[in-house]
Amino acid sequence: MTGAREPIPFGINLSFCVKRWVTPKLWTRVVRERLGLDLVQFSLDLVDPMWPNAIVERHAAAIRREAQATGITIHSAFIGLAHYTFNQLLHPDPAVRDYAEEWLGRAYRFAALAGITRVGGPLGAIPARLDGSEAEALDEADYTDIITRMHRLGARAAAEGLSELYIEPTPMRREWPWTVAQARQMMSDVAGSPVPWRLCPDWGHGTFEPLYGTDHGAMEPWFRELKDVITAVHIQQTDFLLDRHWDFTVPGKVDPVDAASLLRRTGIAPAPVFLEVFYPFEHDSGSILKALETTSALLRRAFA
Protein backbone atom coordinates (compact mmCIF):
# COMPACT_ATOMS: atom_id res chain seq x y z
CA MET A 1 0.00 0.00 0.00
CA THR A 2 1.41 3.39 -0.98
CA GLY A 3 0.45 6.43 1.09
CA ALA A 4 0.36 10.04 0.05
CA ARG A 5 3.66 11.86 -0.19
CA GLU A 6 4.43 13.54 3.12
CA PRO A 7 5.37 17.24 3.07
CA ILE A 8 8.87 18.20 4.15
CA PRO A 9 8.75 20.30 7.34
CA PHE A 10 9.89 23.82 6.44
CA GLY A 11 10.85 26.61 8.79
CA ILE A 12 13.20 29.56 9.11
CA ASN A 13 16.33 30.30 11.09
CA LEU A 14 15.90 33.61 12.91
CA SER A 15 19.21 34.95 11.59
CA PHE A 16 17.26 37.51 9.55
CA CYS A 17 15.90 39.05 12.77
CA VAL A 18 19.27 40.17 14.15
CA LYS A 19 19.24 43.89 15.09
CA ARG A 20 15.66 44.07 13.78
CA TRP A 21 12.91 41.84 15.24
CA VAL A 22 14.84 40.99 18.38
CA THR A 23 12.10 40.19 20.90
CA PRO A 24 9.73 37.22 20.77
CA LYS A 25 6.73 39.54 20.56
CA LEU A 26 8.22 40.86 17.31
CA TRP A 27 9.66 37.80 15.61
CA THR A 28 6.73 35.51 16.38
CA ARG A 29 4.39 37.94 14.57
CA VAL A 30 6.74 38.27 11.61
CA VAL A 31 7.07 34.49 11.30
CA ARG A 32 3.34 33.79 11.68
CA GLU A 33 1.68 36.80 10.06
CA ARG A 34 4.11 37.81 7.34
CA LEU A 35 5.79 34.52 6.43
CA GLY A 36 2.99 32.05 7.19
CA LEU A 37 5.33 29.70 9.08
CA ASP A 38 5.07 27.91 12.42
CA LEU A 39 8.52 26.30 12.66
CA VAL A 40 11.70 28.17 13.57
CA GLN A 41 15.31 27.64 14.47
CA PHE A 42 16.29 30.18 17.10
CA SER A 43 19.47 32.21 16.63
CA LEU A 44 21.67 32.87 19.65
CA ASP A 45 22.43 36.24 18.11
CA LEU A 46 19.16 37.25 19.78
CA VAL A 47 20.07 36.10 23.29
CA ASP A 48 23.62 35.90 24.63
CA PRO A 49 23.73 32.98 27.08
CA MET A 50 26.51 34.79 28.96
CA TRP A 51 24.13 37.54 30.06
CA PRO A 52 23.43 37.51 33.82
CA ASN A 53 21.19 34.64 34.87
CA ALA A 54 18.21 36.86 35.68
CA ILE A 55 18.22 38.39 32.18
CA VAL A 56 18.66 35.02 30.46
CA GLU A 57 15.83 33.52 32.50
CA ARG A 58 13.48 36.42 31.73
CA HIS A 59 14.15 36.21 27.99
CA ALA A 60 13.81 32.41 27.99
CA ALA A 61 10.44 32.66 29.72
CA ALA A 62 9.25 35.25 27.21
CA ILE A 63 10.32 33.08 24.28
CA ARG A 64 8.54 30.04 25.69
CA ARG A 65 5.40 32.09 26.39
CA GLU A 66 5.18 33.83 23.01
CA ALA A 67 5.96 30.70 21.03
CA GLN A 68 3.19 28.81 22.80
CA ALA A 69 0.73 31.70 22.38
CA THR A 70 1.33 31.93 18.63
CA GLY A 71 1.57 28.19 17.92
CA ILE A 72 5.22 28.34 16.87
CA THR A 73 7.48 25.33 17.37
CA ILE A 74 11.12 26.12 18.11
CA HIS A 75 12.95 23.08 16.77
CA SER A 76 16.46 24.08 17.84
CA ALA A 77 18.80 26.93 18.68
CA PHE A 78 21.94 27.65 16.63
CA ILE A 79 24.91 29.68 17.77
CA GLY A 80 24.43 32.55 15.33
CA LEU A 81 26.91 34.80 13.60
CA ALA A 82 28.38 36.68 16.57
CA HIS A 83 29.76 33.65 18.43
CA TYR A 84 30.73 32.00 15.14
CA THR A 85 33.22 34.82 14.46
CA PHE A 86 35.39 33.55 17.32
CA ASN A 87 37.59 30.47 16.95
CA GLN A 88 35.68 28.81 19.77
CA LEU A 89 36.73 25.23 20.61
CA LEU A 90 39.73 25.33 18.25
CA HIS A 91 41.28 28.62 19.38
CA PRO A 92 45.05 28.24 19.97
CA ASP A 93 44.64 29.42 23.59
CA PRO A 94 43.22 26.58 25.75
CA ALA A 95 41.66 29.14 28.09
CA VAL A 96 39.61 30.52 25.19
CA ARG A 97 38.51 26.98 24.37
CA ASP A 98 37.41 26.58 27.98
CA TYR A 99 35.37 29.79 27.74
CA ALA A 100 33.78 28.62 24.48
CA GLU A 101 32.85 25.33 26.11
CA GLU A 102 31.26 27.21 29.01
CA TRP A 103 29.42 29.45 26.51
CA LEU A 104 27.88 26.38 24.93
CA GLY A 105 27.00 24.93 28.32
CA ARG A 106 25.15 28.12 29.19
CA ALA A 107 23.48 28.03 25.78
CA TYR A 108 22.14 24.59 26.71
CA ARG A 109 20.77 25.99 29.97
CA PHE A 110 19.07 28.87 28.18
CA ALA A 111 17.58 26.52 25.57
CA ALA A 112 16.16 24.23 28.24
CA LEU A 113 14.58 27.21 30.03
CA ALA A 114 13.05 28.37 26.74
CA GLY A 115 11.65 24.94 25.93
CA ILE A 116 14.16 24.27 23.14
CA THR A 117 15.57 20.74 23.16
CA ARG A 118 18.27 20.93 20.46
CA VAL A 119 21.32 23.20 20.13
CA GLY A 120 24.09 23.36 17.57
CA GLY A 121 26.28 25.12 15.03
CA PRO A 122 29.90 25.11 13.88
CA LEU A 123 32.27 24.40 16.77
CA GLY A 124 35.51 26.18 15.97
CA ALA A 125 38.37 27.13 13.68
CA ILE A 126 42.12 26.78 13.88
CA PRO A 127 44.16 29.91 13.10
CA ALA A 128 45.46 30.64 9.61
CA ARG A 129 49.12 30.03 8.81
CA LEU A 130 51.53 32.89 8.24
CA ASP A 131 52.08 31.84 4.62
CA GLY A 132 48.34 31.51 3.96
CA SER A 133 48.50 27.80 3.13
CA GLU A 134 45.68 25.58 4.35
CA ALA A 135 46.08 22.30 6.23
CA GLU A 136 44.33 19.18 4.95
CA ALA A 137 43.42 18.05 8.47
CA LEU A 138 43.45 19.11 12.09
CA ASP A 139 46.49 18.26 14.15
CA GLU A 140 45.88 15.08 16.12
CA ALA A 141 46.02 16.97 19.42
CA ASP A 142 43.44 19.51 18.27
CA TYR A 143 41.13 16.79 17.02
CA THR A 144 41.44 14.76 20.21
CA ASP A 145 40.74 17.87 22.27
CA ILE A 146 37.57 18.83 20.42
CA ILE A 147 36.22 15.27 20.61
CA THR A 148 36.88 15.23 24.36
CA ARG A 149 35.05 18.53 24.73
CA MET A 150 32.12 17.27 22.64
CA HIS A 151 31.71 14.34 25.03
CA ARG A 152 31.76 16.70 28.00
CA LEU A 153 29.24 18.94 26.27
CA GLY A 154 27.03 15.92 25.68
CA ALA A 155 27.01 15.25 29.41
CA ARG A 156 26.20 18.91 30.11
CA ALA A 157 23.35 18.83 27.60
CA ALA A 158 21.99 15.66 29.19
CA ALA A 159 21.96 17.37 32.58
CA GLU A 160 19.83 20.14 31.04
CA GLY A 161 17.43 17.64 29.48
CA LEU A 162 18.30 18.30 25.82
CA SER A 163 17.62 15.67 23.16
CA GLU A 164 20.13 16.45 20.36
CA LEU A 165 23.26 18.46 19.66
CA TYR A 166 24.26 19.58 16.17
CA ILE A 167 27.45 20.27 14.36
CA GLU A 168 27.20 22.17 11.09
CA PRO A 169 29.88 21.24 8.51
CA THR A 170 31.47 24.33 6.94
CA PRO A 171 33.38 24.80 3.67
CA MET A 172 36.71 25.80 5.22
CA ARG A 173 39.79 23.71 5.85
CA ARG A 174 40.36 25.55 9.14
CA GLU A 175 37.08 24.27 10.54
CA TRP A 176 35.91 20.71 11.13
CA PRO A 177 34.43 18.75 9.50
CA TRP A 178 34.54 19.96 5.89
CA THR A 179 34.39 16.61 4.05
CA VAL A 180 31.94 13.72 4.14
CA ALA A 181 34.68 11.39 5.42
CA GLN A 182 35.61 13.79 8.24
CA ALA A 183 31.96 14.15 9.21
CA ARG A 184 31.56 10.37 9.34
CA GLN A 185 34.70 10.02 11.47
CA MET A 186 33.56 12.72 13.89
CA MET A 187 30.10 11.18 14.25
CA SER A 188 31.73 7.84 14.96
CA ASP A 189 34.07 9.34 17.57
CA VAL A 190 31.23 11.02 19.49
CA ALA A 191 28.82 8.11 19.15
CA GLY A 192 28.85 7.46 22.90
CA SER A 193 27.86 10.99 23.87
CA PRO A 194 25.11 11.13 26.55
CA VAL A 195 23.12 13.35 24.15
CA PRO A 196 23.56 12.32 20.50
CA TRP A 197 25.47 14.59 18.12
CA ARG A 198 23.93 14.98 14.69
CA LEU A 199 24.67 16.93 11.50
CA CYS A 200 22.89 19.93 10.01
CA PRO A 201 24.43 20.41 6.54
CA ASP A 202 23.91 23.66 4.66
CA TRP A 203 23.16 23.93 0.93
CA GLY A 204 25.68 26.72 0.52
CA HIS A 205 28.44 24.82 2.33
CA GLY A 206 28.45 21.45 0.59
CA THR A 207 28.23 23.13 -2.83
CA PHE A 208 31.22 25.46 -2.40
CA GLU A 209 33.14 24.88 -5.65
CA PRO A 210 36.42 26.67 -4.72
CA LEU A 211 36.92 23.98 -2.05
CA TYR A 212 35.27 20.90 -3.52
CA GLY A 213 35.55 21.44 -7.27
CA THR A 214 32.89 21.72 -9.95
CA ASP A 215 32.32 17.96 -10.30
CA HIS A 216 31.94 16.88 -6.66
CA GLY A 217 28.21 16.13 -6.85
CA ALA A 218 26.87 19.05 -4.81
CA MET A 219 24.76 18.03 -1.79
CA GLU A 220 23.97 14.50 -2.88
CA PRO A 221 27.11 12.82 -1.42
CA TRP A 222 26.45 14.46 1.96
CA PHE A 223 22.85 13.29 2.00
CA ARG A 224 23.42 9.79 0.65
CA GLU A 225 26.43 8.90 2.79
CA LEU A 226 25.40 10.60 6.04
CA LYS A 227 21.62 10.27 6.05
CA ASP A 228 21.65 8.26 9.29
CA VAL A 229 23.17 11.21 11.19
CA ILE A 230 21.45 14.15 9.42
CA THR A 231 18.33 15.32 11.21
CA ALA A 232 18.07 18.94 10.00
CA VAL A 233 19.15 20.91 6.91
CA HIS A 234 19.81 24.57 6.09
CA ILE A 235 18.81 25.89 2.69
CA GLN A 236 19.82 29.15 1.03
CA GLN A 237 20.13 30.56 -2.44
CA THR A 238 23.76 30.69 -3.56
CA ASP A 239 25.99 30.65 -6.64
CA PHE A 240 28.37 27.89 -5.39
CA LEU A 241 31.21 30.45 -5.43
CA LEU A 242 30.78 31.83 -1.91
CA ASP A 243 28.58 30.97 1.07
CA ARG A 244 26.00 33.59 0.07
CA HIS A 245 22.95 32.99 2.30
CA TRP A 246 20.72 34.80 -0.19
CA ASP A 247 16.96 34.57 -0.20
CA PHE A 248 15.22 33.12 -3.27
CA THR A 249 14.41 36.44 -4.88
CA VAL A 250 18.09 36.53 -5.89
CA PRO A 251 19.12 34.45 -8.95
CA GLY A 252 21.27 31.47 -8.03
CA LYS A 253 21.91 27.77 -8.58
CA VAL A 254 19.58 26.21 -5.98
CA ASP A 255 16.21 25.16 -7.40
CA PRO A 256 13.65 24.54 -4.61
CA VAL A 257 11.78 21.80 -6.49
CA ASP A 258 15.01 19.97 -7.28
CA ALA A 259 16.10 20.42 -3.67
CA ALA A 260 12.89 18.82 -2.39
CA SER A 261 13.32 15.96 -4.84
CA LEU A 262 16.88 15.36 -3.66
CA LEU A 263 15.83 15.35 0.00
CA ARG A 264 13.19 12.73 -0.73
CA ARG A 265 15.36 10.67 -3.06
CA THR A 266 18.23 10.42 -0.57
CA GLY A 267 16.00 9.66 2.41
CA ILE A 268 16.73 12.90 4.31
CA ALA A 269 13.05 13.89 4.26
CA PRO A 270 11.15 14.26 6.55
CA ALA A 271 13.97 16.00 8.45
CA PRO A 272 13.09 19.70 8.78
CA VAL A 273 14.64 22.23 6.41
CA PHE A 274 15.35 25.77 7.59
CA LEU A 275 15.87 28.79 5.38
CA GLU A 276 18.99 30.57 6.66
CA VAL A 277 19.54 34.03 5.19
CA PHE A 278 21.61 37.03 6.26
CA TYR A 279 21.25 40.66 5.26
CA PRO A 280 23.52 43.70 5.65
CA PHE A 281 22.51 45.64 8.73
CA GLU A 282 21.89 48.74 6.61
CA HIS A 283 19.44 46.89 4.35
CA ASP A 284 15.95 48.34 4.88
CA SER A 285 13.60 46.09 6.83
CA GLY A 286 10.59 46.57 4.54
CA SER A 287 12.27 45.08 1.48
CA ILE A 288 13.59 42.21 3.60
CA LEU A 289 10.07 41.31 4.68
CA LYS A 290 8.82 41.37 1.09
CA ALA A 291 11.70 39.17 -0.10
CA LEU A 292 11.12 36.71 2.73
CA GLU A 293 7.39 36.55 2.02
CA THR A 294 8.14 35.62 -1.60
CA THR A 295 10.85 33.16 -0.59
CA SER A 296 8.77 31.46 2.10
CA ALA A 297 5.83 31.01 -0.27
CA LEU A 298 8.13 29.53 -2.93
CA LEU A 299 9.74 27.05 -0.55
CA ARG A 300 6.44 26.08 1.09
CA ARG A 301 5.11 25.10 -2.34
CA ALA A 302 8.26 23.17 -3.24
CA PHE A 303 8.27 21.17 0.03
CA ALA A 304 4.54 20.49 0.16
Image (tube, helix red, strand yellow):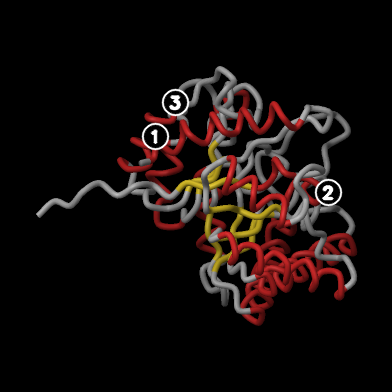
- Where's residue 61, x and y in %? 72, 71
Number of numbered tags placed on the structure image: 3
Q: Residues within 10 Å of mark 1 (few under 14, many from 20)?
A: some
Quadrant occupied by the C terminus = top left
Q: Amino acid at mark 2?
A: Phe
As drawn, the residue found furthest toward the bottom would be 159
Q: Amino acid at mark 3?
A: Asp
Relative vertical location of residue 58 with respect to residue 143 in this rendering, above or below: below
Q: Are marks 1 and 3 in contact (CB under 8 Å)?
A: no
Of 42 and 182, the residue lying toward us? 42
As drawn, the residue found furthest toward the left would be 1
Residue 302: which disc? Answer: 1
Q: Is residue 218 visible?
A: yes
In primary-sequence order, the first of circles 3 and 2 is 2
Q: Are marks 3 and 2 in contact (CB under 8 Å)?
A: no
In primary-sequence order, the first of circles 1 and 3 is 3
| Residue occupying the point 82% across, 38% down | 128
Q: Secondary structure at mark 2?
A: loop
Q: Mark 2 and mark 1: span between their CA atoms?
A: 36 Å
Q: Residues within 10 Å of mark 3 (few under 14, many from 20)?
A: some
Q: Give the number of the mark in front: 2 or 1.
A: 1
| Residue occupying the point 43% across, 29% down | 217
Q: Which residue is mark 3?
A: 255
Residue 89: which disc? Answer: none
Q: Which residue is mark 2?
A: 86
| Residue occupying the point 69% across, 26% down | 287
| Residue occupying the point 54% across, 29% down | 294
Q: In the shown orientation, is residue 88 left or right of residue 182?
A: right
Q: Secondary structure at mark 3?
A: loop
Q: Are marks 2 and 1 in contact (CB under 8 Å)?
A: no
